Image: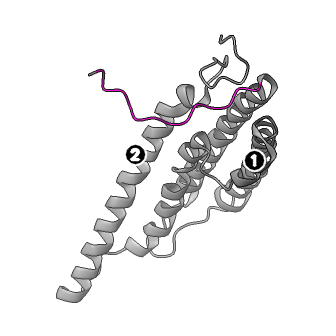
Amino acid sequence: MSAHPGDPTESVPFDASGTFGPAANWIALIGATAILGLAAAIVVDVLMRWLFNAPILGVDDLGKYNLAVIVSSFFPICLIGGHFVTIRFLGRAIGPLRALWLEAFGGLVTLFIFLLFSWQFFRFTLHDVTLTGLATAVLELPQAPWWWMVTAIILVCTAVQAMVLLEAGVRAWRGVPKAPATAVDSGV
């Protein structure tokens, strides 16, 4: 611990980005790979329609459900990095200590939103998709696997945001701002 309160190098007992960052990066990488695969499938589908008047059956059908998984896969990394809607200019105007408390309050509101998302996605996926046997329009595949993946990611986001809030609360209590992001040290 630093002898100077408010020193950004002062340690906080829990670092959400250090704990969840690698897993969130992998989830986002899977999402990025999936969006490239979806884009390739769409390009091939368009070319097949144009050249042979023979579209790939089900690309539209599966694209929208894959897109739901893809978009949600970027949520954990955004939560850890603090990239959701923030009003940091207000924090700069009211001072560093109040800004820390404002950041913690924003984290609490975000956690509340993700708790609501978790509850609604779970309810929707279980009752409206799984129990009804909802299927895709063309291929008639069950939609449940895609919606369960989205629901699982949202549940993970809720846990991640709880840890982000814990870190923000500890930082606000101790008056320790988060160190600014720096380039990765190559050891050279």
Residue 143 horizontal/vertical position (percent): 55, 61
| Residue interval drawn in magenta | 175-187
Q: Is residue 143 visible?
A: yes
| Residue depth check, mark 1 versus mark 2: number of the one nearer the observer | 1
Q: In this view, does 132 lie above or below 108?
A: below
Q: Can residue 126 be seen in this view?
A: no
186 falls in the magenta region: yes
Q: In which quarter of the image is residue 171?
A: top right
Which element type, helix, strand or loop, lies under badge 1? Answer: helix
Please state which amino acid type lies under the numbered disc 1. Answer: Gly
**Magenta span: chief secondary structure:** loop
Q: In this view, does 135 lie above or below 163?
A: below
Q: Is residue 71 rendered to the left or right of residue 184?
A: right
Residue 175 horizontal/vertical position (percent): 76, 26
- Front one among 119 and 95: 95
Q: Mark 2 points at which residue?
A: 29
Q: In this view, does 48 lie above or below 132?
A: below
Pointer 1: residues within 10 angstroms few (<14), some, or many (20+)?
Answer: some
Q: Name the residue under label 1.
A: 91
How has the structure been colored for display?
one colour
Q: In which quarter of the image is residue 96?
A: top right
